[in-house]
Image (cartoon, rainbow, N blue to C red):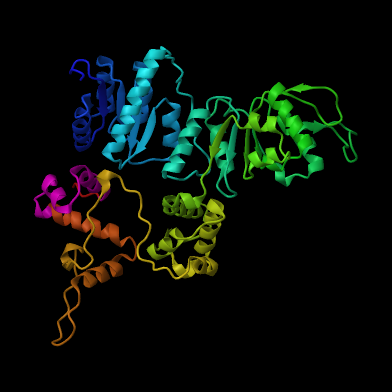
């Protein structure tokens, strides 16, 4: 057993006291020497003094952010394995974390067993790095451009995709993006380009399936005047125009064998020939490709060149169909609605829980593209700011069938963002949810007694129209703080949430004054 002096050092950098305590308790039980820092600045000081093998780093903290700290930590100790933790995962955060040298990225809430397993894997990797003596300052903090368009998804499958983008973007490796139609393959290719060293150079996307076979060579490689009927002038092809940059060949499985041969030469030799010319032209182009066809089967059937397949398939990013990441549906819908509102294309800003539940049961054969079109259509049909079941296409409702709609798809909530749900039959006094409750109506003898919860709900519905849950939460928190005289620890205990969560809610609802 390792002694306190020889035990591997784990540095936890997080401004959440409760989380640091939990991690220290669990990791110390595995004979790790656990160091703590409550800020990025303090974490850098600790890293300078101690050779931590693994660093657990929160992304959002007061002062220096986790992403800033990550870049500094890589310079202090290149061999340390850094695991970024955050409750606010975004596509860009994941990509940047991997680009700047994070060992891995974990979303809150996480199971303590999972973080322990990840820590052990990171420690093993650190030991391997030491043994290989390959400490190399490869992470240079490449300049980053925001990704245009939205690659949305907090599911594990999409997080893996984002990590891979971050890992391959800075190299010139050829990337093949595969997946069903409508999954967003071109967005992934663009993300690789925008996070690459060629991001300031040209990017050209070519849909191979949309160009007739007799014209695609001219489109890609150009042609000389008079090389064929209709060639009235010289044409510069996409490869030549893209010299120094990145070319994306979409639906490459639809390309003819003759064109595949020239693509292979461009990859292997960095040379092209215009149609009708015997001269070769040197080009320096990074190639990205995508297809929804089974290229392995096409190779066996001799309809796709085997040598080209292996040249293209250096790194493969497999996009999951939407039906395999249904937890992303709510987030995707919210994103599409925000984009429509920004473009002033529709007034609808939200979707009802019942409609969301129905869509969470749909199989989405057309994947994300189908979802975007459906939300756009439904937002246009909606009469107010909320999409209801009646606004959804009838064929979608029929496809789902008559399954009972009981609860909406829940949003992903961090472990320090959990609020205890209200029992559905619990009586809530009107004063608990309304700052100025209406006077109670006189009871009629013999009349049915109204459920107090129904009364409270009706008042909230009448007063607010939408966002009832948010309004109710604000009032309940305010009530708990008043009851405890502003003592947050006691109020958090009553509400069934951590103190860290309560502090966030106080800031969110401006209850600190």
Describe residue 17's horizontal placement relative to residue 270 as left or right.
Answer: left
- Which residue in the rendered view is the most extreme toward the bottom? 446
Residue 501 colored in magenta in the image: yes
Describe residue 152's horizontal placement relative to residue 22 as left or right.
Answer: right
Q: Whole-percent x and y of residue 507? A: 24, 45
- Residue 487 is at least partly visible in this image: no
> Up-down: is 48 above or below 326?
above
- Looking at the rendering, which quadrant does residue 14 occupy? top left
> What residue appears at the point 58 percent right and 50 percent down from the top-left corner?
182
> Up-down: is 49 above or below 480?
above
Quadrant in the picture for the N terminus: top left
Residue 270 colored in magenta in the image: no
Describe residue 42's horizontal placement relative to residue 138 as left or right.
Answer: left
> Up-down: is 188 above or below 196?
below
- Residue 380 is at least partly visible in this image: yes
> What residue appears at the point 21 percent right and 42 percent down from the top-left corner?
500
Q: How many marks?
A: 0
Choose between 78 and 5: the one closer to the eye: 5
- Looking at the rendering, which quadrant does residue 2 occupy? top left
> What residue appears at the point 49 percent right and 68 percent down from the top-left corner?
397
Q: Whole-percent x and y of residue 116? A: 28, 33
Q: Whole-percent x and y of residue 163? A: 45, 34
Choose between 438 and 408: the one closer to the eye: 408
Segment tinted magenta in the rendering: 482-509
Describe residue 62's horizontal placement relative to residue 316 as left or right.
Answer: left
- Most common SS among magenta residues: helix
Q: Whole-percent x and y of residue 259? A: 77, 35
- Which residue in the rendered view is the most extreme toward the top? 133
């Amino acid at each position: 057993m390792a002694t306190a002096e020889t035990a591997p050092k784990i540095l936890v950098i997080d401004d959440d006291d409760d989380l640091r305590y939990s991690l220290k308790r669990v990791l110390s039980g595995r004979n790790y020497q656990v160091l703590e820092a409550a800020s990025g600045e303090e974490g850098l000081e600790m890293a300078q003094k101690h050779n931590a093998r693994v660093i657990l780093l929160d992304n959002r903290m007061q002062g220096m952010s986790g992403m800033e700290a990550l870049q500094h930590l890589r310079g202090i100790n290149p061999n340390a394995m850094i695991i970024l933790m955050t409750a606010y995962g975004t596509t860009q955060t994941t990509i940047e974390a991997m680009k700047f040298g994070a060992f891995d990225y974990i979303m809150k809430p996480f199971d303590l067993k999972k973080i322990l397993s990840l820590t052990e894997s990171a420690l093993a990797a650190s030991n391997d790095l030491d043994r290989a003596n390959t400490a190399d300052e490869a992470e240079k903090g490449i300049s980053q451009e925001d990704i245009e368009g939205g690659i949305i998804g907090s599911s594990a499958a999409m997080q893996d995709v984002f990590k891979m983008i971050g890992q391959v973007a800075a190299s010139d490796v050829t990337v093949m993006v595969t997946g069903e139609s409508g999954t967003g393959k071109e967005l992934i290719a663009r993300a690789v380009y925008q996070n690459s060293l060629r991001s300031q150079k040209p990017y050209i996307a070519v849909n191979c399936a949309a160009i007739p076979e007799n014209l695609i060579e001219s489109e890609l490689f150009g042609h000389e005047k008079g090389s064929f009927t209709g060639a009235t002038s010289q044409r510069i092809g996409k490869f030549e125009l893209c010299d120094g940059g990145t070319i994306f060949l979409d639906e490459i499985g639809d390309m003819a064998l003759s064109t595949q041969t020239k693509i292979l030469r461009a990859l292997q030799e960095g040379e092209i020939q215009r149609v009708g010319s015997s001269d070769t032209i040197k080009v320096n182009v990074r190639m990205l490709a995508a297809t929804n066809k089974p290229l392995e089967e096409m190779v066996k059937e001799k309809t796709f060149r085997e040598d080209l397949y292996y040249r293209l398939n250096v790194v493969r990013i497999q996009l999951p169909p939407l039906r395999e990441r249904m937890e992303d549906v709510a987030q995707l819908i919210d994103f599409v609605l925000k984009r429509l509102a920004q473009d002033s294309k529709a007034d609808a800003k939200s979707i009802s829980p019942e409609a969301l539940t129905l869509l969470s049961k749909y199989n989405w054969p057309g994947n994300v593209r189908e979802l975007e079109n459906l939300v756009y259509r439904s937002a246009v049909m909606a009469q107010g700011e909320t999409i209801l079941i009646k606004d959804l296409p009838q064929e979608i409702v029929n496809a789902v069938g008559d399954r009972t709609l009981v609860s909406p798809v829940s949003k992903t909530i961090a472990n320090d963002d959990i609020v205890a749900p209200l029992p559905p039959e619990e009586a809530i006094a009107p004063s608990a949810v309304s700052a100025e409750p209406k006077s109670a109506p006189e009871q009629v003898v013999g009349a049915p007694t109204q459920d107090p919860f129904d009364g409270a709900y009706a008042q909230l519905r009448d007063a607010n129209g939408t966002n009832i849950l948010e309004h109710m939460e604000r009032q309940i928190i305010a009530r708990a703080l008043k009851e405890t005289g502003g003592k947050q620890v006691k109020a958090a205990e009553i509400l069934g949430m951590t103190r860290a969560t309560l502090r966030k809610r106080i800031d969110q609802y401006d209850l600190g004054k």
